């Protein structure tokens, strides 16, 4: 993914959050089957902190109003804007997190995913702190070069890169190997942004 720390148009300073995450539906407060794992890049801070950082979060469950969340997280203020390879291994009761091949976090116990999740990308804003409206609209971007999902195997970051290279060399711009979703919401597998897929 390519994270950016300034808008491509307009003033800088909004608490933008650029994300890659896997999530299941939250059916009700404290849903015991809710599962979520998030990468969140916050170049202007957010979630109550002014610190720019890459945030990794594994969720067990949550109540939205009033807010009460059960999760585990880590924060990496040294990760800056630019291209980064993000890997999460989810296996054997643990999630293991890597940035550019470097291990950066590990979660487990009650925060381990318990149901299938959708793979998703989004760009949103942390509550509070938005700049006031201006004559020039603010436009933000994040780019995704590829996504790889491998079932029932915990590939190392090096193995992930080799598999992506193998798929590209074999001519695959898009190859969806995920099972059909149990719900009517989108799930993605591998995508190559350079071909528009």
Image (cartoon, grey):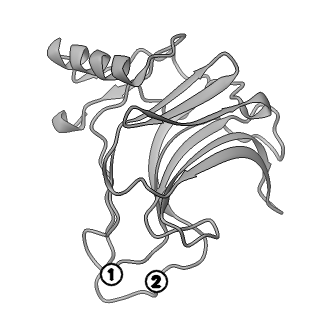
Tell me if I can see residue 183 in this picture.
no
The residue singled out by tag 1 in the image is: 11
Identify which residue, 103 or 132, lies in the foreground: 103
Residue shown at 19% from the left, 20% from the top? 168
Q: Quadrant of residue 32?
A: top right
Quadrant of the snapshot with the N terminus: top left
Determine which of the numbered discs, if any, sits on residue 96 in the image.
Answer: none
Q: Are marks 1 and 2 in contact (CB under 8 Å)?
A: yes
The residue singled out by tag 2 in the image is: 131
Disc with the residue nearer the chain's start (1 vs 2): 1
Identify which residue, 99 or 121, lies in the foreground: 99
Q: Secondary structure at mark 2?
A: loop
Residue shown at 43% from the left, 20% from the top? 156
Q: Is residue 170 above or below residue 56?
A: above
Total numbered badges shown on the rendered structure: 2
Q: Quadrant of residue 164?
A: top left
Residue shown at 42% from the left, 29% from the top? 188
Residue shown at 68% from the left, 34% from the top? 35
Where is residue 193? Give x, y as percent. Answer: 24, 38
Are there few (<14), some (14-19), or many (20+) residues within 10 Å of tag 2?
Answer: few
Tell me if I can see residue 151 in this picture.
yes
Q: Secondary structure at mark 1?
A: loop
Give the left or right position of residue 184, taking residue 150 as reference: right
Q: Is residue 136 above or below residue 58?
A: below
Quadrant of the snapshot with the C terminus: top left
Where is residue 93? Give x, y as percent. Answer: 70, 21
- Distance (Cα) linking label 1 and label 2: 8 Å
Q: Quadrant of residue 100?
A: top left
Are there few (<14), some (14-19), or many (20+) residues within 10 Å of tag 1?
Answer: some
């Amino acid at each position: 993914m390519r994270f950016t720390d300034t808008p491509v148009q307009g003033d800088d300073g909004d608490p933008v959050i650029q994300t890659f995450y896997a999530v299941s539906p939250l059916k009700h407060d404290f849903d015991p089957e809710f599962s979520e794992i998030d990468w969140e890049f916050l170049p202007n801070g957010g979630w109550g902190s002014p610190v720019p950082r890459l945030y990794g979060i594994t969720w067990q469950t949550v109540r939205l109003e009033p807010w009460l969340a059960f999760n585990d997280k880590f924060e990496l203020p040294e990760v800056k804007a630019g291209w980064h390879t993000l890997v999460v291994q989810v296996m054997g009761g643990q999630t293991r997190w890597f940035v550019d091949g470097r291990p950066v976090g590990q979660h487990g116990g009650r925060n381990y995913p318990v149901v299938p999740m959708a793979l998703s990308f989004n760009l949103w804003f942390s509550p509070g702190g938005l700049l006031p409206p201006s004559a020039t609209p603010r436009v933000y971007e994040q780019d995704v070069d590829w996504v790889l999902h491998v079932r029932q195997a915990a590939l190392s970051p090096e193995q992930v890169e080799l598999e992506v290279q193998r798929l590209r060399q074999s001519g695959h711009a898009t190859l969806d190997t995920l099972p059909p979703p149990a719900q009517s919401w989108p799930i993605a597998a591998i995508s190559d942004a350079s071909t528009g897929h």
